[in-house]
Structure formats: structure tokens, C-alpha cells
Amino acid sequence: MRDRMQRLRRGAVTGVGIAATAVVLVSCGGDRNASSNDNGQNTLRPAGPAAHKILSLFTPFFWVAVVVGVAVVGMTFYVALRFRVRPGEERSPVQTHGNTVLEVSWTIIPFLILMVMAVPTIATIFNLAKTPKGKDVVHIEVAARQWFWQYTYTDPSTGFLTANEMHIPINRPVLLTLTSNNVIHSFWVPELSGKKDVVPGHPNTLTIEGDRTGTFLGQCAEYCGLSHANMRLRVIVQTEADYDKWVQEQQTPLSAANVQEFDKKISGEWGCTSCHSVTNRVKGPDAVGASVGPNLTRVGDRAAFAGDIYPMQLDPLTKWIYDAPHQKPAGPLVNWMPNFSSRGMSQQQAADIAKFLICDTATDPASHPECK
Ligand code: CUA
């Protein structure tokens, strides 16, 4: 009788322990609005067909894994408790070797589960790998650099170069061609699609598409050097009208006076044009090739700079121009923005260049409070 009570009590303690663990685990999930670490990269909140397909593959697999996990861990606990040695007990378990029925069944059952799961997995892989065709498709070449993303819009209706911030029209497939001339990177915007490696000498393709408007953040997902974590990006999904407007803005060259100011006053003194350009057309007489640093033609229109890590504001941009290596580590191996403060640039000169870059390249300078 006493023995039975003891067992009941121990069972109750174990039950409470398991329930408490479950409560802690569930509360880790949290509400996305209340959560402080919402970085806008949530695969459980898909915003495009590719991301939806991946989620609908993930969800049933997750529950299969939960059932298997709970069964295995539960049985382990049960056996450990049920067959443990009790005080005063002196017995050895019955010694056996092998149990054909058990061994065959725990081989066949997982095999069958994996075979069933392979069917939708392979189907989804092939489905996601399809190349979209038709007039609707937007083509963008993505070049991964250490450490920023360069985008070349290659369609006849676009034909320009930009960096870090990609704009795409809603409900239209966007075929990305991913290239690298340095190391391996990985392009990843979780709410729009899975990740795809960017491999030197082997262009990969990835189709993304947004089914709601908004800003979707992404980042490089393959370790690519010291500032791998500072290689972020954003994709802005826009209505067709907003997207057309943005394309037009990108295609509008800077005024001749602004280009001249950049070439003479800014680049002449500091050599900026050896890495950057303020023209962005990829065809025609004023075409530019790929550059070492991000294209700056409409840099004032972007929300952030330096691999999408600093907001496009005077202060951070001034600090960046003054002394970039201390704003984003690069190490000795990478061709990198120099520390201009050690080349005699004053803070005021850096601030002047920052102001030019934000206010004279922005389509609508009034949208920056600092440009008024
Ligand atoms: Cu590029 Cu990590």
C-alpha cells in the first residue's frame, strides 16, 4: 500500500515537471508584435508562393516529428522509471539478445515514414526549381560582393544597376540569377523564398514573388568573411504603379551639375569613382559595368546603406565616409572602403559628402528631414 502511494507521488512530480517544461517552451514562441527580436525574417509568415509552398511542406513534417519525438522521449522516460532499481531490491533483469519482431518493425516503420515524406519533398524541390517564363517575368542579376548585394535589372524596360535594396512588383515572378566573383554567399529572404547559394563560377537561379506589398528583410546565409553578418538586404514588394514609378526614378539620371560635382569635388579629391559610380545604366553610351562598391546613383532613395545595416541618415553616413573600417570590419584580405580620416579628411568634409549623397541623389530630397 505504502509502495503504491510512493509511486503515485513520484508520478505526480514527474507530470508536473513535464507540464512546467511545456509551458516554458510554449511561452518562448510569443506574439510577434510583443516579441522584441522580430527581425522581419519569419519563415512562418510567408508572403509569396515559394515561401507558402515551403511552409506547407514544413508544417506536416513538423507534426510528424513532434509525434515521433514525444513517443521516443516519452517511452524512454517510462522505461527508465518503470524498470528502475528500487531500494532493497536485488535482482538482475532477464538477459536477452535480439528480438526479431521489434528490430524488423523499428526498421520498417521509419523507412515507410521517410518514403512517404520523400514524395512531397521531391515534388516541392522540382516545383521550386521551375524557371518562370512569359512577359510577366522580371529579370534581375544578383551579384554578391564582400559585403553587399548588387542588382542589375536586365529587362529592356529596366536596364539599370542598384544595390542592397531590391524593388519588385506584386504578384509577378522575379527570376534572380545569382553570381559571385569572390567567395560563396547565400541569398535569403525568408518571407519570400528559401535560401540559394551564390557560388563563384556557377550562376544559380532563384524565383521569388511577393503576394502582398511591404518590406521583406533578408541576409546572407553563408559565412563569407568578417562582415558576413553585415551583409543584409531588403526586398520591397510594390503595387505595379509604385514599382513603375520607382523604375522611372532609377532610370532618371542625376543632373549634369550633380554628376560634375561628384566627379570633381568629391571623387577628384578622394578617388570615390575608382569604386563607385553615379550613373547606373547598363546599356547605351553611358553604360557602366559592375563596380567594386555599391552604385550610388539613387543612393539617397534607399532606406539603408553599407549592406543595409545603417539607416540612410546624415550622421551614420558621415561616420561611414569618415572611417568606414571602424563601422564595418573587413580584415586585410578584402578590397575595402579606406579610412579617409587617416588620409586627411575632416569630419566636416565627410558631412558635406554625406549630405551630397543623400540630398542630391534622392528623387525627393524633401523626404529626408536633413535636406530641408
Ligand atoms: Cu555573404 Cu555571408
Image (tube, rainbow, N blue to C red):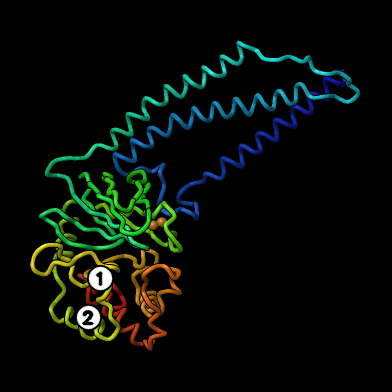
| Depth order, front residue of 81/331 | 331
Q: Residues within 10 Å of mark 2 (few under 14, many from 20)?
A: many
Q: Nearer the viewer, residue 335 or 221?
A: 335
> Which element is circle 1 on?
loop
Residue 81 relative to residue 150: left or right: right
Which quadrant of the picture is home to ligand 1? bottom left
The correct choice, above or below, for 265 with respect to 277 in the image is: below
Residue 372 visible in rendering: no
For the point 28% across and 67% down, the residue is: 294
Image coordinates for residue 58, horizontal then vertical, percent: 42, 34
N-term mark: 2 or 1: 2
Q: Nearer the viewer, residue 58 or 363?
A: 58
Q: Which residue is mark 2?
A: 262
The mark total stands at 2
Q: Are the residues flagged by discs 2 and 1 in contact, CB closer than 8 Å?
A: yes
Q: What amino acid type is highlighted by mark number 1?
A: Leu
Among the 4 quarters of the image, the one containing residue 243 = bottom left
Which quadrant of the figure contains the N terminus? top right
Determine the residue positioned at 23% across, 54% down.
141
- Assign the C terminus to one quadrant of the image: bottom left
Name the residue beneath numbered marker 1: 296
- Report the residue at 15% width, 82% height from top: 257
C-alpha distance separating marks 2 and 1: 10 Å
Instruction: Rate crowding at label 1 as few (under 14), some (14 to 19) or many (20 or more) other CA atoms within 10 Å.
Output: many
